[in-house]
Image (cartoon, rainbow, N blue to C red):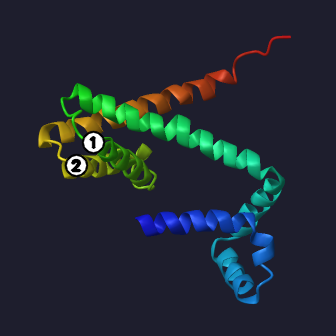
């Protein structure tokens, strides 16, 4: 999993310098093959990165904001759910691992909103961190319910926010 994270980060960095790296013949050949196999997805992605090339600072700021305001908050949410379930005595590293790896696994397009996949990963990692089996089952279910609740709430804002008439 760590290797896949490193590969993903490397691919992201590669995309910001794609125009320079595309001049290298073997890389250009691999990109052409990848573009054909992905039905032009690489070209569209490269075009999007080209548009944000001059705004690298803004992109990095948005990534930083995402880490601080989304991911760290999810770690604390998991911790407080565990504390309420009587398992708050685990190390903060256990919650950090369970939250980040569980949410990453939840991104896999296997189930809707990662429910089930995230739960199994979080349960397994909490048990590995020393959590008792009962709370280790309950905590990820409540955690996923909280995530789904916020997703539905955001969906209502998205749908009904467009219906609001702008004030003049």
Chain-order first, disc 2 or disc 1: 1
* Quadrant placement of the N terminus: bottom left
Q: Is residue 57 left or right of residue 131?
A: right
- Whether pointer 2 and pointer 1 mark residues with C-beta atoms closer than 8 Å, the reply is yes
User: Which residue is most to the left?
Assistant: 133
From the image, state whether disc 2 or disc 1 is nearer to you.
1
Residue 40 position within the rendered picture, expressed as x and y whole percent measured from the top left = 71, 69
Q: Residue sitting at 76 percent across and 57 percent down?
A: 48
Observer able to see residue 150: yes
Q: Please name the residue that numbered disc 2 is placed on.
A: 129
* Quadrant placement of the C terminus: top right
Q: Please name the residue that numbered disc 1 is placed on.
A: 91
User: Callout 1: few (<14), some (14-19), or many (20+) C-alpha neighbours within 10 Å?
Assistant: few
Query: In the image, is residue 64 above or below residue 109?
Result: above
Q: Residue sitting at 39 percent across and 33 percent down?
A: 76
Q: Secondary structure at mark 2?
A: loop
Residue 50 position within the rendered picture, expressed as x and y whole percent measured from the top left = 81, 60
Q: Secondary structure at mark 1?
A: loop
């Amino acid at each position: 999993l760590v290797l896949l994270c490193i590969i993903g980060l490397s691919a992201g960095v590669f995309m910001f310098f794609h125009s320079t790296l595309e001049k290298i013949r073997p890389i250009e050949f691999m990109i052409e093959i990848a573009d054909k196999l992905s039905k032009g997805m690489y070209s569209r992605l490269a075009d999007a990165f080209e548009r944000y090339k001059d705004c690298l600072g803004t992109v990095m700021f948005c990534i930083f904001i995402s880490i601080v305001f989304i991911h760290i908050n999810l770690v604390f949410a998991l911790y407080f759910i565990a504390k309420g379930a009587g398992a708050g005595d685990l190390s903060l590293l256990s919650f950090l691992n369970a939250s980040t790896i569980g949410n990453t696994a939840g991104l896999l397009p296997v189930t809707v909103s990662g429910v089930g996949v995230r739960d199994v990963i979080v349960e397994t990692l909490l048990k590995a961190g020393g959590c008792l089996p009962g709370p280790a089952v309950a905590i990820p279910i409540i955690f996923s319910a909280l995530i789904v609740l916020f997703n539905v709430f955001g969906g209502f804002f998205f749908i009904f926010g467009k219906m609001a008439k702008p004030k003049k």
